[in-house]
């Protein structure tokens, strides 16, 4: 015993005499062993610590319990000990020779103990605890002697020196605190007194939660004290809720129907980001029932299928489904991943959409604003009711990829959140192919948007004509739209309302060009804002799949005359839904007007109404101004409502093979 | 206490103490000491034990390919110890279900578990690699990463901090774009906190030093000595999941790449500075030498090596220090591997299948000094601690890999003598119907006390740097 005690004293002396600048070199006879630099804990940190209270230390996990012995050989329950104060717990052993191991933690504790002597706040709220993982050598008596050597740090504050009765008693504690130890072996395979371990010090709060874990690189008295004071300040603030420091500065910005990651001007070197915070993407639920029952100015009454009248409950259910990413084979795809609310319920970030697993979709995401009035759905017009349409994306292998109707139904049935929701919306009828379709259709039908500047100028004559609702430029554009440019022959404006579509199929030449046109030898590619290169098409082809064929309406009718015909889209909210055309090949409204001014792309099946228009640049600009006056006054309301909808992502309560396989 | 006396005592014992340390380092094949001999094995967290000798295994996080074998993602274990009878062969393949866009992986700080993320399905697969390092098992799957984190998509880098894992995201569940966050987990796989990348609207206290604050994320490395974390920025789900050819042709999509590197306070996990690094900075590697206060990254689109460094006024800055190939041909620099002494870096360029060695001894004059075509395409490079062995794999992303005959999928082992790479063996992942080989992590028996090796000679030396 005497020898052990002597060794303890010897190590203590060495420990306490380490000065911050000290480092020692290897004996030159022992080859090229690099000097061991002292850990930062022995000296100054070398960087400025964040201000006390300026950061958070979220709970990492519950501090495990355990039975240990104190300096007097009395049994101590760790959980009992932790109560009442913050505890810094270090695992160590008295024989430790690694200067950046246990001696470091003892040195740092010694410094903190000295600080406790000066600062009553620390002395009354902090406890230090050194627990040996070498019970065979570190008896309570040895631990007491070890501890006695730190007494000159002052008598204020608490520092416990703990051990266990045996390795058997210690092991569960080590395991719970994930302290792997390994008795080092000599070359002859005998055990030495050296123990290999990774130094970790735990900061445990009075509620038995671990709040930080320190390693050699940042085990420093200043940093540890900073953390303890930060937690004490947090406690103080919690006691006085009014004074509580806001978690983060989160300015409230107006919710607008613009992408959160706006890239306008990316082509130029003067581009600056205008990114929005996702944590601020919050909205308020709107009364969509009222919106759809009384459509905004410029829109006709919404017709409701006789077997699917619009109700509040169905809209709410459809809205929840619309944003639920679990309604796909691998839980990653909702309708809203392509029909993004703040991107015009379309996708501004892609010419052509991508589906599950990144599979290519050969067309641009159309907006679903005012989809209630569409008599043909999809760019090729292959569907004619929203109730039927929904099954195409749900089951398409390159969209949401659900393997069957039954799969979708059964999955929704198994998700706890949907319990009772269908029954409530459908007079007791649960989820099935019909009710699911009807709920989806109700929400989509409710997204009617009008009362644009144009509507207020053109349709408000019954009350009081709002002559100034639209600019002079837009009014000139309107005149061209109706006359010289002849846009209105397809984008129709009626006497009492305007849908800006004839719901018919036309060949403009865009599709023809994609199928039959000659591809350029190089393609201009943006590498960074304002930085472009012209890349050989062959290079791009080497990493691209073959472009899928697209012949438009022909694919549905099989009539050769229908090749490359696509549906006329509405122009309402067209400013919000770039890029344009069925393949998203034109980025701007200016580009679209220019395309038509040139007469589209000539081909034998081109709609005869499309021909060179001979509009000068001012006239083209006027038409663009008109198109920009078609944004509905309620888009922010609808987007805000969408922001308020929960995004459905998988939780541990949801069906998933993993939970079953790994739980047994 | 008389400090003069103590110092005298210490001076007497200091030599003994040093000798003890030195001898133990020399003699024991398994030991753990702190040292300045540092390498990156090749890019591990500084908080964990590292293998400095011959590694026994390489774990390859592999993407399932539809129509190839079972089509599922899998962890493939290859025996890489030349003294083993199974050297150069696949000794284990563990399928995990689904194609999750397997990408990066990282060990917990105790190196007992390997966390491997799926960029598409947002699952994190936690493998037990300590019970039997030759036969990893699936211990836990985190399935609720998105809902728990508040909408973060695309778990990428899984980086060990003491007792916890920091997981960088690439995207979000609102628009599948590039705005994202880092997500902190306990080693047990419990969610702790979400740390959002700074945006213009909410810089979270960071300083926007240039024109960009895009809020994008990708990789993460820490320089504990300087209390710094460094993150880079790639692109969102829509882009990294879509066909590469289709994306390059889509001008809207090409605007959605990250142009920033963020400097964080490592201790508080708060962003301090947003630096302009245009052209999608990807992998970040921080220097190991004690006087090297810098990290490097490479930009995928603009094909440059960038230095992220602390200047004389303790301010962090970024500057380009070398071109990688001909940017107009989009060589697409992907993985990088910094040498143990910070004197060189391997840079792979995906499009031409080349690995390139850049000399970093003079950071003002960085030059490519060696290159070799590994195959039709190359992505990851992993160097051993001593720099003598370099391993390569092929896959970048499922829909970015080359098509047809150019879609070679492999794991290759090379020896590097300082002048030439010499191929030792190659495993064809297509022929074995395994899938697309992506990230590599090393394993060794000697990391774990309870997994005794069959032969004593298999013990690798370890170094601990925490």
Image (cartoon, coloured by chain):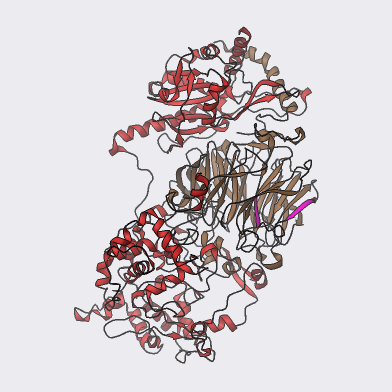
**Between B377 and B398, the one nearer to me in the picture:** B398
For the colour brown, the matching chain is B
**Between A294 and A513, the one nearer to me in the picture:** A294
State left or right for residue B226 relative to residue B8: left
* Residue A282: % across, % down: 35, 56
Picture quadrant where residue A135 is located: top right
State left or right for residue A167 relative to residue B271: right
Picture quadrant where residue A19 is located: top right
- Does the magenta-highlighted stretch encompass residue B426? yes
**Between A372 and A246, the one nearer to me in the picture:** A372
- Report the quarter where the N terminus of chain A lies: top right
* Residue A508: % across, % down: 49, 85
Chain A image colour: red
Q: Is residue B339 above or below residue B66?
A: above
Residue found at x 57% / y 32%? A217
Picture quadrant where residue B431 is located: bottom right
**Between A607 and B399, the one nearer to me in the picture:** B399
- The answer, for residue A150, to whether it is visible in the render is yes
* Residue B290: % across, % down: 64, 35
Q: Is residue A560 above or below residue A354?
A: below
Q: Is residue B445 above or below residue A460?
A: above
Point out the residue furthest to the top here: A2
Point out the residue furthest to the left here: A463
> Range of the magenta residues?
B423-439
* Residue A663: % across, % down: 50, 45
- Does the magenta-highlighted stretch encompass residue A383? no
- The answer, for residue A107, to whether it is visible in the render is no
Residue found at x 69% / y 23%? B21
Q: Is residue B357 above or below residue A371?
A: above
């Amino acid at each position: 015993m005497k020898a052990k005690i002597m060794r303890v004293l010897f190590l203590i002396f060495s420990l306490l005499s380490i000065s911050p600048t000290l480092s020692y070199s290897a004996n030159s006879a022992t080859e090229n062993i690099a000097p061991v630099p002292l850990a930062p804990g022995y000296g100054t940190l070398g960087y400025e610590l964040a201000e006390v209270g300026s950061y958070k230390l979220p709970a990492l996990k519950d501090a495990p319990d355990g039975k240990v012995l104190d300096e007097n050989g009395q049994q101590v329950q760790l959980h009992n000990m932790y109560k009442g104060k913050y505890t810094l717990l270090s695992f160590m052993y008295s024989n430790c020779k690694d200067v950046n191991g246990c001696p470091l933690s003892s040195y740092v504790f010694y410094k903190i103990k000295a600080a406790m002597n000066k600062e009553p706040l620390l002395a009354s709220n902090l406890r230090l605890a050194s627990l040996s993982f070498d019970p065979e050598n570190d008896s309570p008596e040895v631990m007491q002697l070890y501890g006695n050597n730190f007494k000159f740090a002052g008598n204020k504050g608490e520092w416990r020196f703990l051990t266990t009765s045996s390795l058997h008693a210690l092991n569960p504690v080590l395991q719970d605190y994930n302290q792997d130890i390994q008795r080092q072996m000599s070359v002859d395979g005998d055990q030495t007194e050296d123990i290999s371990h990774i130094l970790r010090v735990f900061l445990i709060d009075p509620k038995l939660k671990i709040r930080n874990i320190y390693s050699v690189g940042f085990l420093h008295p200043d940093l540890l004290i900073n953390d303890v004071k930060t937690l004490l300040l947090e406690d103080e603030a919690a006691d006085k809720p009014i004074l509580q420091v806001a978690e983060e500065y989160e300015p409230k910005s107006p919710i607008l129907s613009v992408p959160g990651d706006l890239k306008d001007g990316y082509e130029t070197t003067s581009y600056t980001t205008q990114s929005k915070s996702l944590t601020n993407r919050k909205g308020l639920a709107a009364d969509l029932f009222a919106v759809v029952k009384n459509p905004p100015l410029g829109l006709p009454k919404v017709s409701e299928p006789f077997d699917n009248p619009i109700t509040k409950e169905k809209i709410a259910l459809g809205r929840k489904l619309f944003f639920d990413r679990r309604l796909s084979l691998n839980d990653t795809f909702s309708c809203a991943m392509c029909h993004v609310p703040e991107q015009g319920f379309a996708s501004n970030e892609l010419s052509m959409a991508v589906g599950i697993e990144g599979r290519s979709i050969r067309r641009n995401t159309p907006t679903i604003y005012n989809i209630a009035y569409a008599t043909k759905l999809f760019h090729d017009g292959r569907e004619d009711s929203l109730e039927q349409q929904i099954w195409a994306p749900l089951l398409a292998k390159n969209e949401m990829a659900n393997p069957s109707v039954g799969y979708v139904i059964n999955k929704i049935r198994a998700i706890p959140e949907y319990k009772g929701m269908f029954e409530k919306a459908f007079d007791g009828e649960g989820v099935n192919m019909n009710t699911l379709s009807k709920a989806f259709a109700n929400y989509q039908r409710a997204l009617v948007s009008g009362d644009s500047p144009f509507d207020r100028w053109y349709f408000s004559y019954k009350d009081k004509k709002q002559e100034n609702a639209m600019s002079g430029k837009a009014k000139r554009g309107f005149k061209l739209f109706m006359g010289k440019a002849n846009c209105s022959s397809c984008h129709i404006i009626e006497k009492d309302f305007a849908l800006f579509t004839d719901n018919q199929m036309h060949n403009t030449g865009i599709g023809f060009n994609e199928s039959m046109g000659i591809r350029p030898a190089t393609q201009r590619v943006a590498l960074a804002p304002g930085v472009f290169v012209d890349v050989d098409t062959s290079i791009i082809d080497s990493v691209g799949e073959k472009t899928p064929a697209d012949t438009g309406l022909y694919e549905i009718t099989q009539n050769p005359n229908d090749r490359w015909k696509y549906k006329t889209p509405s122009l309402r909210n067209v400013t919000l839904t770039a890029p344009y055309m069925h393949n998203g090949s034109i980025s701007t409204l200016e580009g679209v007007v220019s395309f038509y001014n040139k007469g589209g792309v000539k081909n034998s099946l081109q709609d005869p109404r499309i021909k060179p228009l001979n509009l000068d640049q001012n006239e083209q600009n006027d038409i663009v101004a008109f198109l920009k006056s078609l944004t509905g006054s309620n888009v922010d309301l609808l987007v805000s409502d969408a922001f308020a909808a929960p995004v459905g992502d998988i939780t541990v309560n949801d069906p998933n093979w993993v939970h079953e396989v790994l739980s047994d | 206490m008389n400090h003069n006396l103590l110092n005298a005592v210490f001076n007497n014992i200091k030599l003994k103490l040093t000798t003890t340390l030195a001898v133990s380092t020399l003699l024991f094949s398994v030991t753990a000491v702190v040292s300045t001999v540092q390498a990156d094995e090749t890019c591990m967290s500084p908080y964990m034990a590292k293998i400095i000798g011959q590694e026994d295994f390489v774990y390859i996080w592999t993407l399932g390919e539809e129509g190839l074998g079972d089509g599922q993602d899998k962890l493939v274990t290859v025996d890489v110890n030349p003294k083993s009878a199974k050297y150069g062969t696949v000794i284990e393949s563990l399928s995990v279900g689904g194609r999750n866009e397997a990408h990066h992986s990282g060990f917990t700080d105790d190196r007992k578990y390997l966390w491997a993320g799926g960029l598409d399905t947002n699952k994190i697969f936690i493998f037990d690699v300590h019970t039997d390092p030759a036969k990893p098992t699936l211990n836990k799957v985190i399935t609720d990463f998105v809902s728990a984190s508040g909408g973060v998509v695309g778990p990428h880098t899984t980086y060990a901090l003491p007792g916890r894992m920091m997981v960088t995201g690439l995207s979000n569940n609102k628009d599948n774009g590039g705005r994202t966050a880092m997500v902190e987990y306990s080693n047990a796989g419990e969610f702790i906190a979400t740390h959002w990348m700074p945006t213009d609207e909410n810089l979270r206290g960071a300083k926007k030093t240039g024109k960009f604050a895009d809020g994008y994320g990708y990789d993460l490395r820490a320089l504990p000595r300087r209390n710094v974390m460094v993150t880079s920025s790639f692109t969102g789900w829509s882009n990294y999941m879509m066909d590469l050819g289709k994306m390059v042709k889509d001008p809207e999509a090409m605007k959605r790449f990250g142009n920033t590197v963020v400097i964080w306070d490592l201790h508080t996990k708060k962003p301090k500075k947003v630096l302009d690094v245009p052209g999608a900075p990807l992998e970040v590697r921080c220097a190991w030498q004690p006087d090297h206060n810098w990290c490097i990254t490479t930009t995928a689109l603009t094909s440059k090596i960038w230095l992220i460094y602390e200047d004389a006024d303790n301010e962090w800055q970024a500057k380009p220090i070398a071109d990688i190939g001909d940017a107009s041909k989009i060589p697409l620099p992907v993985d990088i591997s910094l040498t143990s002494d910070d004197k060189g870096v391997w840079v792979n360029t995906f499009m031409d299948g080349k690995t390139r060695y850049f000399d970093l001894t003079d950071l003002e004059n960085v030059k490519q000094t060696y290159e070799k075509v590994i195959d039709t395409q190359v992505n990851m490079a992993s160097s051993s601690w001593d720099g003598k062995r370099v391993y390569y794999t092929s896959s970048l992303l499922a829909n970015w890999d080359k098509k047809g005959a150019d879609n070679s999928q492999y794991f290759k082992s090379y020896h590097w003598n300082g002048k030439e790479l010499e191929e030792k063996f190659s495993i064809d992942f297509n022929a074995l119907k395994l899938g697309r080989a992506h990230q590599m992590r090393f394993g060794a028996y000697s990391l774990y006390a309870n997994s005794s090796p069959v032969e004593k000679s298999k013990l690798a030396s370890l170094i601990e740097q925490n």
